[in-house]
Every structure is written in structure tokens, then in C-alpha cells.
Amino acid sequence: MLQVRERRLQALLWQRAREPFLGAWSAPGGYLDPGETLERSIRRHLAEKVDVRELAHLEQLETRSDPDRNPLEWELATTYLGLVPADVDPVVPEDTRWHPVSRLPELAFDHRAIVLAGRDRLRAKLSYTNIGFALAPPVFTISELRELYVAALGHEVSATNLQRVLLRRGELEPTGERREPGRAGGRPAACYRFRSRRLEITDQFAVLRPPER
Amino acid sequence: MLQVRERRLQALLWQRAREPFLGAWSAPGGYLDPGETLERSIRRHLAEKVDVRELAHLEQLETRSDPDRNPLEWELATTYLGLVPADVDPVVPEDTRWHPVSRLPELAFDHRAIVLAGRDRLRAKLSYTNIGFALAPPVFTISELRELYVAALGHEVSATNLQRVLLRRGELEPTGERREPGRAGGRPAACYRFRSRRLEITDQFAVLRPPER
DNA sequence: TAGGTTTCCGCCTGTGGGTCGAAAACCTCC
DNA sequence: GGAGGTTTTCGACCCACAGGCGGAAACCTA
């Protein structure tokens, strides 16, 4: 479960209350109930930590089956990537906290690899899908969106290019509103929103694309 | 398990010998043994059908958990995409046969969706990885490679662009050999091979890429 | 040698992202 | 009410690269 907080990409972690890895930080999750869907299960376990209605996007990553991943017993884990928009601040229990992905503590099991895999999936999809909607509030300025992209991608992003690329793709549409300038003044920024808040793929990336017509 | 055969992308299917879906075509697979890795399990089950040394690539797709996917009992399935180069013709048992993905028979369970998901993953990765190596024989001409891409992608591909794109990316290297022209004559074609036979990702597709330094 | 076939290669073009700088629109302070 | 500072926006230019085309190259048969 990832969110951009304080200009950094952060992961929601909680401290284990049982062996193995008692006291170690770990990603939220839990066991599957009989007859239950994987997505339903992950939502159920997340609901113990946060209000799942604040989850803007949830997608399956991969199923990990290394027999050594749990030192006590053989178990499989199907991992998911969840994204929370930057404008909400979910209430979380005492044992749960956000950690910058760039500075993770020691994590239980293979959870470090899992969190990093989630970050990488997010970074890749920012390039060829509209997944930014899951990081962004409903309405935002280009500068604000740029900050989110910088935090998630880990490198600078040109506001000019970001605006042009997302507009050309049709991902963004202006709301017509303007944002009041801050203390220092400056031109008031135009507000935008994502046209769709469901995952859509930009097909433009098909190199060797079919001949026109 | 997919292969380009007779200029078409085909899937290896076998006829079920048990209920449910007795007699229906289905993708190869089977149950996981305790303590076993998923990849090891899929290789073990594939080995019952073909020589797994002929498998050039194997990657996990997704884990499906819809409780209705099996009418008899609740079970999960982790699906894989396997690719066989076009130059081998594995010996297969009596109940097993290749079927064009574009004309699949009725399939057991959700196997139709699984096969199509594999095809889609392959198509996507042909654009931004060197996954073509898993479809192609060790040495080939550009025309031969073009046929494989056409079969897998389902649309025309320009040989000029294919050659230029793959050479520029460094995926391909010339072997120096030439292919004897056929009956009708024609200029002898240069032979190429993939520089690497392991999956590598072309990073060029990172839109909003980091600024050049 | 003429005509056919297949492959190869260079040229041109269009698209779209990277970069830069100037204009626009606001502020505060003198 | 200017001057100067700040932030956003927009246009202009560049360049890399894929798509498309046509001709040259290299082979065949008749």
C-alpha cells in the first residue's frame, strides 16, 4: 500500500505481534479464507488497518512461492499493489506507520522485495497508463501533479512535458477552476482532473504497431 | 504454452481424462506439491507433455481465485506463459495437440481466458522486451523473424522497421552467414541471432524519463 | 542477356518528447 | 502605482526515432 506523503513515496507497514519476525515491520496482509477471492481477502485484511474506501487502485503483483520465505512453514503469498491518493490521510492503528520506500527498515519475510516490486510496477505504469489518478487528489494543478510524479518516479519531471504528454493522451482535462496563488504571489494555476479514474493503457507504446488503416 | 507453428500462434492443449470437464481441451498444469516452488511445479507438469528443455521462456502471469472457476471445488490457479522456439517440434502424447489461439475450441475452466491472457502478455512484451528470442530459432533471417512477429502480433510488420528497431536496440547481431536463396532466386539473406536469450527490458519506453545529465 | 524474385539500404517525413526562454498573472514593498 | 520577485503557462526549436518508399544489390531461371 503506497502513497505519496511529504513529497516522498511511502509504504504502509505495521509491526508484527507474533513469531516469526516478532516486532519486525511488515506489509499488511493475512490468510485467505476458504471460498474467498484473493482480492476480497486483501481488502478484508487492509480494512483492519485503514478505510479501504480510500484505496484508489488495487492490482495483483505476483505469487511468491520460495519455500524459504517463511522460516517456520511452507506458505505462498500473492502480493498486491494498493495506491492511496495524496489528499487523504487515513487513520491508522497504533502499530501501523508510513515509511519512505527509499528508507525501509528491516522487513519481515520477503516483504522488502515485495514493496520494491510494487514501487517498480508503479513506476513502469506511470509511463504507459493513467495510473497517476490513483496518486492524485480529484482536482490538482500541474505543479502538484508534478510533485507526485517526482516522488513516485524518483527523478525530476518537467512540468511542461508532463502537461503536454498527459493532455495529448487525453488523460487530463481542465476543470476551468483556478488555484489562488500563495504568499509569494505568482500566476494562479489552472486546475485539472483525470478524465478517468480507472486504469487505462496508452496503446501508443506499441512499437512495431500495426500499419495505419 | 505457446509456439508459432505454420505461421500461426498456437497453444498446446490436452484433453481432460477426468471430471470436471471430462474430454474438454485444457491448458497443461496440475497441483502443487508441498514445499514445491510454483515454477518447479509447472515445469514438472509440463514435463509430462513435452521435453521442457525446449522451453525458451517461462514467466508467471497471474493467480486466479474466482470461486466459480471450478464447479466442483474451490481452488486457486497460478498461471504461466511458456514459449517454445519455432524450430523445434516437441513430441507430444496422444491426447495433446497444438491449437491456433485465434480458433480455440471450448476450453475447460477459465482456460480460454488464461490462454488469451498469455497471448496478450506476449504481444505486449514483443514491443518493449527482447522476448522474440523465445519464439525464434537460434539463427534466422529478418524475413523469418518477421513471419514470427506477424503470427504473434496478428498484424503486418515491416521488415525494414523490424530490422532497424531490433538492431538499434542491440537485441540482434549478425552472424555473418548467409542463407541460400530458394527456388525462385533472390538475394541471399543475412543471418542474425539474438544477442541475449534471457529476458531484457528496453528502457527507452520510459516516457517522462529522467533528464539527460 | 532479359526478366523475375528477394533482400538490403538510404532518404524523407511525421510525430512526439526534451529543452529553453519569454509572456502572463499574481504578489509585496517601497 | 511602479519595481522587482514568484509561479505558471505557452510557444518555438531541436532531435531521436519509427513509418514508408523506392531503388540498388544479389541471386535465380529461361
Image: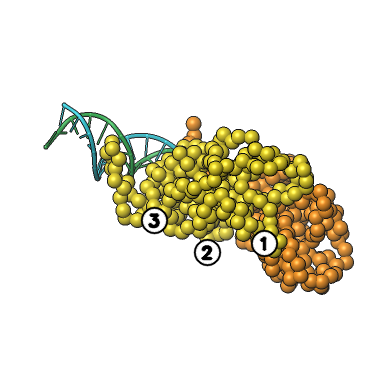
Chain colours: A yellow, B orange, C cyan, D green
Tag 3's secondary structure? strand
Q: Is residue A129 visible?
A: no
Write down the residue under mark 2: A213
Q: Residue at x 59, y 36 (%)?
A: A104
Q: Nearer the viewer, mark 1 or mark 3?
A: 1
Residue A92 against residue A36 in the figure, above or below: above
Q: Earlier in the sequence, mark 3 or mark 2?
A: 3
Disc 3 with disc 2 on a shared chain: yes
Name the side, left or right, on which A205 lies relative to B71. Answer: left
| Residue B67 appears in the rendering | yes
Q: Position of residue B38 (x, y in %)?
A: 77, 51
Question: Between residues B136 and C25, which one lies in front from this camera angle?
Answer: C25
Q: Nearer the viewer, residue B91 or A116?
A: A116
* Apparent side of residue B130 relative to residue B22 in the rendered image (left or right): left
Chain of the residue where label 2 is placed in the rendered structure: A
**Quarter location, residue B172:** top right
Q: Which residue in the protein does label 1 denote? A: A36
What distance separates the C-alpha of mark 3 from that of mark 2?
28 Å
